[in-house]
Image (tube, helix red, strand yellow):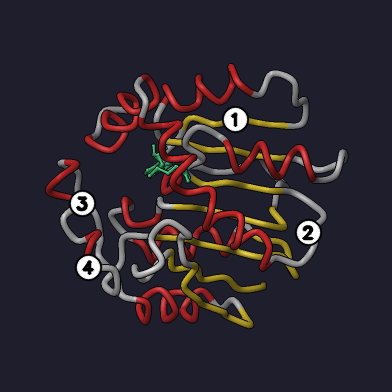
Amino acid sequence: MDNPVSQLFDKWAQDYHADGMEIEHWPTVKQAIELLPPVQGNYLEIGMGNGYAIQYFAETGFDNCLYYGLDISSEMVLKVEAGLKHLENIHLVHADFLEWQPPENTQFDLIFSMEVFYYFSDIQAGMDKAASMINPGGLLMILVNYYMGNPESHDWPKELGVPMQLWSEEQYREGFVKTGLQNIRQQHLKHPDHPDEPGTLVTWARK
Ligand SMILES: C[S@@+](CC[C@H](N)C(=O)[O-])C[C@H]1O[C@@H](n2cnc3c(N)ncnc32)[C@H](O)[C@@H]1O
């Protein structure tokens, strides 16, 4: 895969950035996970980065579940593969989510994604696709720090040299409405080190 996003994250997988992302993201990801009811079934993470969240779910989840982790960066996938050899029920996939098809007859009970959807050329297409892969009763949870209500993030495309889609809170909520998912909830999760900032925007819903 040869696009600016996979190139950026291939580089980040090999230097200090991937582990730095985990340190920066975990405090709000942890709060988001605490919002979820206990989920039993198949898990898919879109854009897993260095794999800290899929590792958490796989280590604290149920033995008979499948855990799929997908990333557009081949180097991130290799990094996760190397780190999670001790876990048997993990399937790692190198793919652009917008082009990926899960194995036949595989649906998910929780689809989770942190800091990924704004890299998609078409956020709505990503949401629709994720929603279509969820079992009845399953959940979709999307977290972002790059959004209209977080002005500190607005320079990221320039700083990182990759295109990003800037959506507002309302657009994320409306996007979920368009997917047909039910019981849509949205909130801001404050990072303890940056309490004055608007925090991570989390939107989630049930099928
Ligand atoms: C900012 S990082 C976040 C990683 C991780 N979720 C975290 O919380 O640290 C974004 C990740 O999404 C991946 N990504 C971006 N666009 C993607 C796409 N179209 N399909 C799959 N993965 C993608 C990148 O390669 C990168 O690993």
Residue 153 at x, y percent in the picture? 24, 59
Look at 78% across and 59% down and name the residue there.
39
Please give left or right for residue 191 compared with residue 11 in the image: right
Q: Distance between the residues labelled 3 and 4?
A: 10 Å
Q: Say what secondary structure mark 1 lies in.
A: strand
Which of discs 1 and 2 lies nearer the camera? The answer is: 2
Q: Name the residue: 66% across, 68% down.
A: 35
- Where does the C terminus fall, quadrant-wise? bottom right
The residue tagged 1 is 92
Report which residue position mark 2 lands on: 39
Q: Nearer the viewer, residue 27 or 177?
A: 27
Of residues 110 and 52, the one nearer the viewer is 52
**Residue depicted at 77% across the width and 25% down the height:** 88
Percent from the top left, x then y, of residue 133?
61, 57
Whole-angstrom CA distance, mark 1 to mark 2, is 20 Å
Quadrant location of residue 84? Answer: top right
- Dot 3 or dot 1: first in sequence order is 1
Name the residue tied to disc 4. 151
Q: Check the image and report above or below for 57 versus 184.
A: above
Q: Is residue 88 above or below residue 181?
A: above
Amino acid type indicated by mark 2: Val
Gap between marks 2 and 4 measured at Cα: 34 Å
Residue corresponding to mark 3: 156
Nearer the observer: mark 2 or 4; the answer is 4
Residue 109's place in the image compared with 183, above or below, is: above
Of the two numbered discs 4 and 1 in the rendering, the one whose residue sits closer to the viewer: 4
From the top left corner, tell me how far across and down residue 10 is, in percent: 34, 25
Q: Do the residues labelled 2 and 3 touch (CB within 8 Å)?
A: no
